[in-house]
Image (cartoon, rainbow, N blue to C red):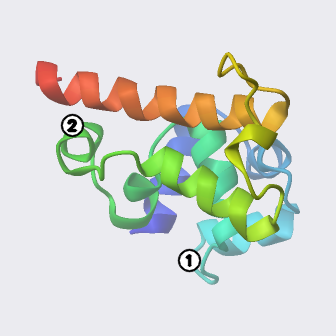
Amino acid sequence: MFSDRLEKYRSGLYLKRKEMADKLQVSESYYSLIESGKRSPSKNFIEKLVVVSELPEEYWIYGINQEDYINTRDEFKSLKKALDTILDLGYFNNVNEIFDENNDPKDSLGRLLISALKADMNCMIKKRKGN
């Protein structure tokens, strides 16, 4: 159950609910409702939790462990998610707006896409090595 995983994670860090709420940039009351199972986490909450914990959203939502996640993860998931978000926000219409003629990023959007690609590549390498 999501609330059990959340409580176990927080306890493993030896944090109080208030400290964990601060770490996730949410109110203590909202965090407490989620950890107690009285409220479902928002997508934004899960995204913050993924960043802070460095655990995949599949772990938080479905309880899939790290080893199974590597074996079942969609290829280029991070890149697809980053690109979908950027396109939905209408930040660019052409790849040349993000990367220069040497394929170097012009701004933070390009760096974000490169970071997402690197995360996907690391996952694919682990998958091939059987880790």
Instruction: Say which mark, if any, is on residue 67.
Output: 2
Foreground pick, 41 / 112: 112
Instruction: Say which mark, if any, is on residue 119.
Output: none
Which quadrant would residue 40 be assigned to in this image? bottom right
Instruction: Say which mark, if any, is on residue 37.
Output: 1
* Amino acid type of the residue tagged 1 in the rendering: Gly
Q: Residues within 10 Å of mark 1 (few under 14, many from 20)?
A: some
| Relative to 120, residue 72 above or below | below
Q: Given contact means CB atoms under 8 Å apart, are the residues at marks 1 and 2 in contact?
A: no
**Secondary element at image label 2:** helix
Image point 74% across, 64% down: which residue? Answer: 31
Q: Position of residue 33 (x, y in %)?
A: 70, 75
- Image quadrant in which the N terminus is located: bottom left
Q: Position of residue 5 (x, y in %)?
A: 44, 55
Foreground pick, 38 / 56: 56
**Secondary element at image label 1:** loop
Foreground pick, 129 / 38: 129
Image point 29% across, 39% down: which residue? Answer: 66
Image point 20% across, 51% down: which residue? Answer: 72
